[in-house]
Image (cartoon, rainbow, N blue to C red):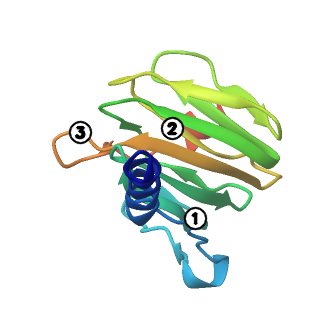
Amino acid sequence: MKLMLTAPALMLAASTAFAQSVEISRHEDRPGQIGSGTVFTGTAYISPVFGPQMNNVSAGEVTFLPGARSAWHTHPAGQLLVVTHGTGWTQERGQDKQVIKAGDVVWCPPGVEHWHGASDSTSVTHYAIQAVVDGSAVSWGDKVTEEEYLD
């Protein structure tokens, strides 16, 4: 009888020893930066949310000031944009520009060339969520021209 009670207790203790703990990543420990002028027009502030530790998926919180936008780009695994504040624009190459606003979720399929950013008069903030494939999460193209942006 003693052996029968000891075995479950040992199994429970062993599973507890291998359990992981909840981790909290504090906002102040994840400093952001102004986006590079080679791939952004205007001011875009990018703050990491989480790195690719979760199945090679990462996310960043991006705030575009009025008039700011990304260059044309694609993502090998696609990208989700979760708009949390403000109003902005996104456009797929060859399609009409679309308004995006707080509460919207935008799916950019793998390999589809697009850009996103603020409108000409309002800022926008979104979470950009994408996966790394073969060492890259994004492939940058040309900057969006003023004509393309305002069209």
Q: Amino acid at mark 3?
A: Val
Q: Earlier in the sequence, mark 2 or mark 3?
A: 2
Spatial CA span between label 2 and label 3: 20 Å
Q: Residue furthest left?
A: 134
Mark 2 residue crowding within 10 angstroms, few (<14) / some (14–19) / many (20+): many
Which is more foreground, mark 1 or mark 3?
Answer: 1
What residue is shown at x 64% (from left), y 84% (from top)? 28
Q: Nearer the viewer, residue 9 or 97?
A: 9
Position of 102 compared to 25: left or right? right
Q: Which mark is residue 151?
A: none
Q: Residue at x 36, y 62 (%)?
A: 38
The answer to whether residue 145 shows anywhere in this view is no
Q: Quadrant of the C terminus?
A: top right
Dot 2: element = strand
Foreground residue among 52 and 66 = 52
Q: Secondary structure at mark 1?
A: loop
Q: Which residue is mark 3?
A: 133
Kindly state the secondary structure of the residue where label 3 is placed.
loop
- Looking at this rendering, what residue extends furthest in the front direction? 1
> How many angstroms separate mark 1 from mark 3 (CA)?
27 Å
Tags 1 and 3 touching, CB below 8 Å: no
Residue holding disc 2: 115
